[in-house]
Amino acid sequence: MTSHGKIHPDGTSNELKTDRSMKLILVTLGVGILLTISILGLAIAILVKVNTNKSSTITTTPKPLDSILAESIRIDDVMDHLNAFQRIATSSNGNRAVTTIGYNHTLNYITDTLAANTNFHVSKAFFPVRQFAMASDPILISSINGVTKTYTFSKDLSVADFTYIELSTRANFMAFVGISVIPNVGCSDADWKNANPPVAGRVALVKRGVCAFSDKGVLAAQNNAAAILIYNDGVTPDRVQPMAINLGQENAVPALFLSFPVGQALAAAAQDSSTNTGVQLVINLVDLPLSPVGNICADTPTGDATQTIVIGSHSDSVPAGPGINDNGSGSAANLGLAIALAKLFQTSTYPQYKYRVRFCWWGAEEIGLLGSDFHVKQAKIATDVGERLQDYLINLNYDMLGSPNYIFGIYDGHTAASNTPAQALPGSNKITSLFRDWFISQKLPWNHTDFSGRSDYGPFLFEGIVAGGLFTGADEVKDQQTRDYMDQMLGQGMGGIAGAIQDPCYHQACDSIQNINVFAYEKMVQAAAFMLENLARRDDLSGFLYPNGKSTRSNSQSPQRKYNSINEYFRLPYL
Ligand SMILES: *[C@@H]1O[C@H](CO)[C@@H](O)[C@H](O)[C@H]1NC(C)=O
Ligand SMILES: *[C@@H]1O[C@H](CO)[C@@H](O)[C@H](O)[C@H]1NC(C)=O
Ligand SMILES: *[C@H]1O[C@H](CO)[C@@H](O)[C@H](O)[C@H]1NC(C)=O
Ligand SMILES: [Zn+2]
């Protein structure tokens, strides 16, 4: 997840990274064919290479998994769930994104399968999500000393002067409105207060950088800007054109994204007191209702509800594709784990756990961790025993477990954001070590991955709940050293492809059932099962995870939420 769902602190989106990585690969491979064909070809090449090599070189003696649950879980069963998600996507316009029928079918499949195979208590909680679609192309016209200029809108960002920002509110300026250039990059309230002329009632022009785009949007609204125009910073050639971004569910201002030259020219004109500069803008939206999105949780009927282990994965895909690796693989693994545990509990030889286990499928991860965030917010105000945040000991998160050019990635507790509550750190580091030791015992290669809170564990971690998880890679390129290390551990040729993206179908239509490396996926599922059993069999899990004691923040103590609310690139169809 360094790769995954990441927006850099300066607001660089995944898309740009993907773009760059793709360019790198295209150059490396010297392929001059169409981008889509290359992506598909690459995915197939990686899978063929890895799968072919698997049969020839992998050692045959399976290692004991050090976990009855891990031994009991069958990858074929997990693949059945994944195939079901693929069938749902195929029969639902190719994806399982929130607000689509494919998403509803996904939720139904999860609840029906749980009902048929477990005696767990299943609950669904719905929360409303804002949808966004443009009714017509947005319009941006400037007037500088009476000379008007109409800027080019295009969905092809390489030719666009500007583009819309998702979850912009509507605007229809009849007259030209003056511009206020926000000093620095508009990340502090002081920047906004120091704008001259004052920004209230004017259009704020602010450069990309330093903080999340949504932070700039919040400050624009707080300072009563009539609209916000964000522009690229031109620092490198790939930071010139406008960007497709999303300002988040809570955005309350009209917003457009400008190219660097357009933003710079407007800023220069607006700052020159001898000129009279204003803009007109029109942002016409389709009226869409709030869409209900569901979280599903399934609880073991036994175990201490005030000491709950939460295992989460997200149930939605991006609109671009079926989302089988991202994040069908996590969802199916979670389902497989829940069912395997229910089956074991029904045997007399497998004692019940001391702790309750709550398996959850979060909705709307792809548009900003909305499902897990909603759940944590509810838990913070809940009073029922077992539903309160204080009842949670740990959140394990599984998202993207079968990337074609995989790594065995373990969230690295040491890379938690600096504002993570201290009580969550020792336990999170222990989870990292436990996973690492398991991979070592299995003679499998392993790598650390980023733990900055940009997936569904983020809201838990931010409230001081220990977290951990696994991740096989998204839009990062596998380097030579990592490939060689994996080759050395797994057998020559098993290490995948150096210089290629870990999941070349990340957030694309080709993220289908073909996009899963079953060998890697099985290991990750086993690791997840090992972790659950290892934790659940401890006498004093709370003492293990919170050696210095555990408290849960009250609402008033929580600082403004600082994990990124726009963790994934998200674009609804253009209506
Ligand atoms: C999905 O289910 C929700 C909740 O039951 C419902 O309101 C919504 O209309 C459904 N969406 C579609 C596309 O069927
Ligand atoms: C993965 O781990 C190996 C062995 O420690 C190391 O050489 C390699 O640099 C790591 N790769 C990444 C991307 O961290
Ligand atoms: C899949 O789940 C993982 C773990 O929660 C998460 O990090 C990742 O963002 C999810 N995948 C996508 C595409 O969101
Ligand atoms: Zn994603």
Image (cartoon, rainbow, N blue to C red):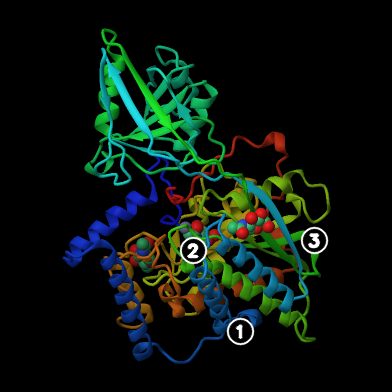
Q: Nearer the viewer, mark 1 or mark 2?
A: 2
Between 465 and 39, the one nearer to me in the picture = 39
Instruction: Provide the residue designation for mark 1.
Output: 71
Q: Amino acid at mark 1?
A: Glu
Callout 2: helix, strand or loop? loop
User: Dot 3 surroundings within 10 Å: few (below 14), some, or many (20 or more)?
Assistant: many
Q: Which percent across, then down, holds residue 228?
A: 43, 28
Instruction: Provide the residue designation for mark 3.
Output: 305
Q: Is residue 546 left or right of residue 566?
A: right
Q: Amino acid at mark 3?
A: Ala
Q: Quadrant of residue 139?
A: top left
Instruction: Provide the residue designation for mark 2.
Output: 95
Q: Mark 1 or mark 2: which comes first in sequence? A: 1
Residue plotted at (42% across, 69% down) = 403
Between 405 and 83, the one nearer to me in the picture = 83
Q: Mark 3 or mark 2: which comes first in sequence? A: 2
User: Dot 2 surroundings within 10 Å: few (below 14), some, or many (20 or more)?
Assistant: many
Residue plotted at (48% across, 64% down) = 93
Q: Which percent across, then down, holds residue 404?
A: 39, 72
414 up-or-down from 62: above or below:
above
Callout 3: helix, strand or loop? strand
